[in-house]
Amino acid sequence: ASCDLGSDHHYHHYINHPNHKKPPNQLLNQQQLRGHPNELNARQPNVPKSNVSKKTTQNTNKATSQHPEAIIKREKQQQQGQQGANHGNNKRRNHNFAQRAEYLSEGIDNNGFQDNLDGLTLTTIPKHQDADTNTDNSNGNNSDKASNIQFHQLHSQRVSKLDGSTTADDVVKAIKRAQNLHDEHDVVEIAHFLLEEVDQSFAYGYRGSLLSRLAVASLHLQNYDVAKRCIIERRISHRSSMLPLESAAIVRGLLRCHHSDEAWEVLEDELSLPLEGSVQWETNERNKNDMNDDELHLEDEATRRRLEARDRLIHRARSISSIASRHFYEMEPTEGIRAVGKLKDMGGIVKEAGLTAEDVGIPWDRLVKGAALCESKRRDGKWDNVDESDDGAESPSSWPCNIVYTVLDAMIAFPSENKDVTFEALCNALVRRTVFVTGAVDMEGCPEADRGEVAFIGRSNVGKSSLVNMLTNRKSLAFTSKTPGKTQQFNYFAVNDKPELARQIRYGDDVPGEKDRDSFYIVDLPGFGFAKVTQQLRQQWSDFMDEYLQERETLQVVFHLIDARHGPTDEDIKIMQKVGTILGAKQQAKEHCAKYIIILTKADKNVKNAKSQSNPGKVSNKVKEKLIATMKENRVGYAPIVLTSSETRLGRDEVWKYLRFAAEQ
């Protein structure tokens, strides 16, 4: 027969089917299959017992294992954590025990099997049944607390009820199933069980974690009422055992339901920053063998607090990034900027805690792309007609010239990850168009001073053009060559100007349009030292630079590039003297003056296989000491120092920190 003898439901249907007719001598009755396992061999007199096929033996065991007492015994062994005799050999045995129990109990006196069937998940037990009729459960829990728990029926076949014998693992399985299958009935029943039936001591205090799981599942099903009750009960009864991972999951769930205010409330309450001085971030370097018991106890307590605080910082940062990302992609830049500002504020304590970029794991590329999307809509005029007096809902005038700069500020505050995918998104958002405007040899050849400017200066072959190409994510914006001194004029590059500016410059056409609000000029100054030019031309460059530094009011930043392998040369010292004299005089006169930044290039040359190592570049202590001393002698000791490499992309985030000053002019 094609029927599966291992399934009671199929077998019962097969035997009692009205069209089924078999000769009596060819039909094995149900009692023979279940009560007499050797009956199959007895029905085959011509086949020796030793020659019975393996398949026949398996079918015999499969059939006889469906005896009611065998089912009950196997179920009890599963609940007690024991392995049954034939358990796991056939997955079909675990199929719908409720239907099997109903079938086996038909026509049988309940008084004889009641104690044994209590361990099965009977669907016939009503929800309002008195707990006294089920005092002997399979787990042997006869306490008054367990006996007073009301029965809760679920749709799940694996965990079909919640009662006094339910374990934490059962609840977790039920929650996962309800969330995956969007079973709101089971979510509500589980909520009644956890909130009304059991107390704080359920599952040895694991109830708080179960409530957090249920809150996330409820939010996944858009059931905010159940989630809110779980969050409040967890906060009141299980505050001491709340885990940052659970709080972060709740925050993300609230964001999915568009409850951003509640998400902020959970964040500030459960993932707050540690109080200043409450955590000892530096580890004790003393040997534990030299400590007494009290000192060991204090050290263990400090370590525990440090680990807990670090975990809270990690999940707080990730939660804030989720909030910012959600607002950016929902075209709510004001709230996104606020969230990124919170992220920037905690950058200092993250570095103090010794966390790395890999530890925190913030998706900076997603934040950059979300902010760039808002900025694109802003350029299209989405918020041009917003009334700033309307409850401060939108205030475009308070936004930066490019919203992506807020994400850049937070990136700089955190440990740098230096990922190409992140900076590719950053450069594409901040440098959308670049075009060579002109090459000036005197002040009259400079373009109109209608935007901010940044100037790159340094001796020949120091890597100015390579650095400019790296910062703008272009391969040939500035001309690079192995021959020193190719840059022999003040080259102006317009960033984010009007789209058809190149056609206007090349053909003289009058192209409509305006430059973007974050447009600026990059000025590549000629190199000194190795340039093969006459002394007269070299002096002409020097005079032009003096005039440019003193009279160009739109100049915001001067980047002085120095080779990290050799330190400052004689030409670099002359530049420092010139900058120190001109900018120092303007500072004393309280006039506007550009910021002076020292950039050490080619840092990867000081490291072997820099691309394959975690250290993308460095500078020797000898070079560093020489540089600092030279800067102090020439009255520019205040200048920041940035270590860069165009090969390993080191330092591009720090350089962009100062480039933005030109864009904000």
Image (cartoon, helix red, strand yellow):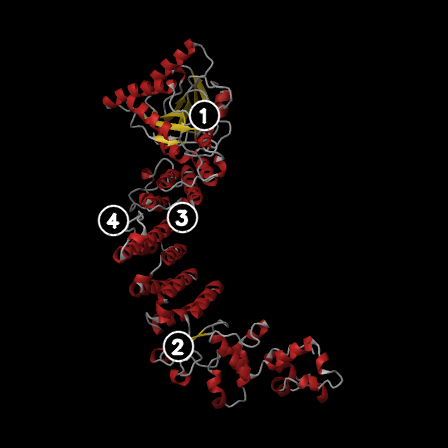
Give residue 22's position: percent from left, percent from top. 71, 85
Give residue 171's position: percent from left, percent from top. 43, 69
The quarter of the rendered structure image containing the C terminus is: top left
Secondary structure under the numbered disc 1 in the rendered image: loop
Secondary structure under the numbered disc 3 in the rendered image: helix
What is the number of the mark on residue 277? Answer: 4
The quarter of the rendered structure image containing the N terminus is: bottom right
Mark 2 or mark 4, which is nearer to you?
A: 4
Q: Residue at x 49, y 90 (%)?
A: 112
Q: Would residue 223 be seen by someone viewing this image from the given angle?
A: no
Local packing at callout 1 (Cα closer than 10 Å; few below 14, some 14-19, many 20+) is: many
What is the number of the mark on residue 463? Answer: 1
CA gap, disc 2 and disc 1: 74 Å
Q: Nearer the viewer, residue 389 or 658?
A: 658
Question: What residue sits right under mark 2 in the picture?
Answer: 164
Secondary structure under the numbered disc 4 in the rendered image: loop
Secondary structure under the numbered disc 2 in the rendered image: loop
Q: Residue at x 53, y 85 (%)?
A: 105
Q: Are marks 2 and 4 in contact (CB under 8 Å)?
A: no
Q: Are marks 1 and 3 in contact (CB under 8 Å)?
A: no
